[in-house]
Amino acid sequence: MNCRHLFRTFNKSVVSTTISRRSKGYKIVKRPDPSTLKMPDPGSAPSLMEIIKEKLRLNGPLTVAEYMHIVATNPTEGYYMKKDVISQTGDFITSPEISQLFGEILAIWFYAETQKMGSGKPLQLVELGPGNGTLMVDFLRVLNRLGYKAGDLSLHLVEISETMQLAQARRLCLTHRSTNIELPYNYEGETASGIKVYWYNDLKKVPNNFSWYMAHEFFDVLPIHKFKKTEEGWREVLIDLDENGKLYYRMSGKETQSVKVLIRPPLDAGDRTELEISARSLGIARQLAQRVDEYGGLVLIADYGHEGEKDDTFRAFHKHKVVDPLENPGECDLTADVDFSQLKIAASKTPGDDNYAVVAGPVQQRVFLERLQAKARLQVLLDNAKSEAEKEKIQSAYEMLVDPKQMGERFKFLAFYPSSVGPILEKFPPLGFVSDVDK
């Protein structure tokens, strides 16, 4: 129906209502106040498997990205929504939880690189996926010693889980509270020294100001699409339900929309027959690049991953062990290695782009930490240890961070700088990404 016909029909209906009398009227329904709405208790909500089965029954096979999104973020049963999962007794542990040295070295890197651009005050300290808040505790301790006061900085944490928000607030803040639904942040607090802390469910809501952006073990949990190359071309790996009610992988019969949108040069370069692409990761990397280029700041990404040489990395962790990602959804951490080559493509300059980043890395975690004199900091911690048992614990934690067989080579670092800093970086190369011999 075209617009002219639509208006003619509408006009006729208006005329007819002026002649005839309505037998029934419309009832005014009051909208509920969003602030009074509550999610059902976890025990009363359907299980994730029931939710997934219903979606499969109604809509057909799920992409791996859809499956990961449901499992991670379902409001009542999602993996990150209902419990603390980062600890020795949880499903995995992160570098900041292993040693305070990790966060301290990263804070010093940000400070040192900022001196190439100016004072760095006032400063927004932004973390994507702050975990238990441990990394920010270490950052604030360093910044305090470097002379930053409450009026010099503010904390902005991007976190979708209310459970994790509360854990972070208890760790960081003296006081904290929920906020009005109309505000861009949904939670706020204040540290003992008076530093303001804000929580957001989306990076887009964080104010555009000079910022340090930290994303540690953040990109590895973002949903990925999985693809395989067949004789008919690229096809997407989907998740379906077999006759026994068990989840399994199957190939799409035709090109999906994800194939058409995501698989394009240079992401499909070379002779690769399998691909994992996270559209969300590409979008966030691009957004971070644009932010630091337009408003100033630095981005540091630390995660386990590769530079395009791996294909099938989708897996799950439960109690620090690798398990089947299709078994017991909601009880395991779903993850995939970060393809740093894709993040570099997303952040770097492309034709027509006004804002982009100068990208440094990736480099292995072992290399990055040792180039930033982590061994010297280790020695200070050892010298201040109160017992041999404490010394052994500190040394063991450090070895876990740098040992090639543990975190040393699997974890990598990637940095984004404003494009205007390019000439400065040629004279003073990025710390941690270039060896002293190369300078």
Image (tube, grey):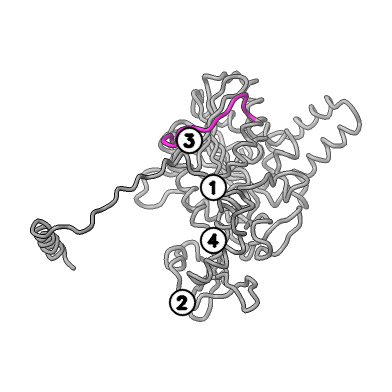
Q: Which residue is mark 3?
A: 185
Q: Tell me where residue 105 appears, x and y as whole percent.
A: 67, 33
User: In what quadrant of the picture does the C terminus appear?
Assistant: top right
Q: Earlier in the sequence, mark 2 or mark 3?
A: 3
Read off the magenta span.
172-183
Nearer the camera: disc 2 or disc 3: 3
Task: Determine crowd level at label 4: few under 14, some 14-19, many 20+ residues with C-alpha closer than 10 A.
Answer: many
Q: Tell me where residue 69 appears, x and y as whole percent.
A: 55, 56
Q: What's the mark number on residue 65?
A: 4
Q: Is residue 223 above or below residue 252?
A: above
Q: In front: 420, or 312?
A: 312
Q: Earlier in the sequence, mark 1 or mark 4?
A: 1
Q: Quadrant of residue 4?
A: bottom left
Q: CA distance from mark 1 to mark 2?
A: 38 Å
Q: Amino acid at mark 3?
A: Tyr
Q: Is residue 216 above or below residue 340?
A: above
Q: Identify the residue at image location x=55%, y=33%.
A: 428
